[in-house]
Amino acid sequence: MSTGILKGKKGIIFGALNNMSIAWKVAEKAHAEGAEFVLTNAPIALRMGEINELAKKTNSQVIPADATSEEDLKNLIEKSQEILGGKLDFILHSIGMSPNVRKGKTYTDTNYDWYHKTMDISAISLHKTLSAAYNMDAMKDWGSVVALTYIAAQRVFPDYNDMADAKALLESITRNFGYQFGIKNKVRVNTISQSPTMTTAGSGVKGFTEFVSFAEEMSPLGNASAEACANYTVSLFSDLTQYVTMQNLFHDGGFSFTGVSLDVINRYVK
Ligand code: NAI
């Protein structure tokens, strides 16, 4: 059901790799709700070409940008404003990658060059994006920036590896830049802490399938899907959430506040 909640809103959506990506679902939902946007991803991800299908479907253009490159980000923000015909109402940061996770390095035997890369791609890229938008005065008053995060920023999930540190930094950047952007022109910055979701990035984490089942049993509402995450994201881009900023918002069916569920405890009944 669409209500046109984003009618007239313009933005940039990072991170739609394929039709499982959370960003892909956000783009579909934002389009259905009347938004116009530019899609972007790292040049290497664009080579797979799947994003063109989404661009066609949502009537949007694609601009390549490596989110670790300040130059690419400036170009993206400049071109997006040209294409969309004005300043931006929203930005979705849906980016995550850890070379240590990808290449099977453990947390206690990390490769520090890769650790830096994890931080740069998965967290500092948000700072760079916000900084480019802030310094180029590219956001409209009462605009909204959302980044995706995971509860491993607060609690230990051993196989999440250095991504846990990256998410903690991402959430800190959200608070600190949220303050600055709020003062400048009422722009809000929040993270959504999403349930484990079967996507390319998610399934790269060791033991992910088992973990999805565990989270499902631990969450009173069950795991939140990528589509549900898109709905929540769209609400944060809308004018109905104008005073929500600098928050980490759990979107996880209640997982974050459940100590133990009956489903899990019943496994131990003898
Ligand atoms: P995905 O693999 O579809 O999306 C990750 C995106 O990051 C890809 O589009 C990839 O091309 C992009 N990316 C990687 N390096 C980049 C760079 N240098 N510049 C620009 N883009 C780059 O996976 P998913 O799950 O949709 O991930 C989106 C976000 O959601 C990530 O921040 C992830 O950590 C977060 N998240 C995912 C959960 C899950 O279980 N799938 C749970 C909680 C948060």
Image (tube, rainbow, N blue to C red):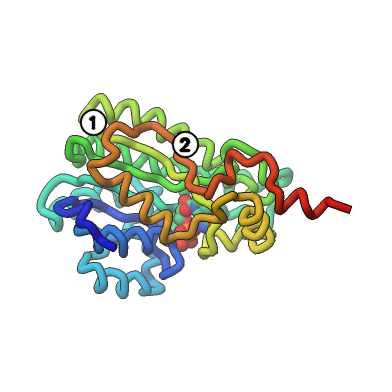
Against 86, residue 208 (above or below) is below
Q: Residue at x 25, y 61 (%)?
A: 2
Residue 186's tag is 1
Q: Amino acid at mark 1?
A: Lys
- Outermost residue on the right side: it is 270
> Going from the N terminus, do you reach mark 2 or mark 1 first?
2
SS assignment at label 1: loop
Label 1 beta carbon within 8 A of ligand 1: no
Measured from the top left, where is residue 92 in percent x and y? 34, 50
Using the image as rendered, state which of residue 243 and residue 64 is in the foreground: 243
**Marks 2 and 1, how far apart in space?**
19 Å
Q: Which residue is situated farthest in the left direction here?
A: 85
Say which mark, if any, is on residue 92.
none
Disc 2 residue type (three-letter): Glu
- In the image, taking residue 170 as reference, residue 133 lies left or right, namely left
Compared with 187, 63 (above or below) is below
Is the residue indicated by label 2 positioned so its CB lies within 8 Å of ligand 1? no
Residue at 31% in and 70% down: 54
Residue nearer the viewer, 162 or 256: 256
For label 2, the SS is helix
Crowdedness near tag 1: few (<14), some (14–19) or many (≥20) residues, C-alpha within 10 Å: many
As rendered, which of 165 and 37 lies closer to the eye?
37
**Residue at image mark 2:** 171
- Answer whether residue 96 is visible to the viewer in this image: no
Residue at x 42% of width, y 41% of height? 191
Query: Where does residue 105 sit, x and y in percent of width and height?
Result: 69, 53
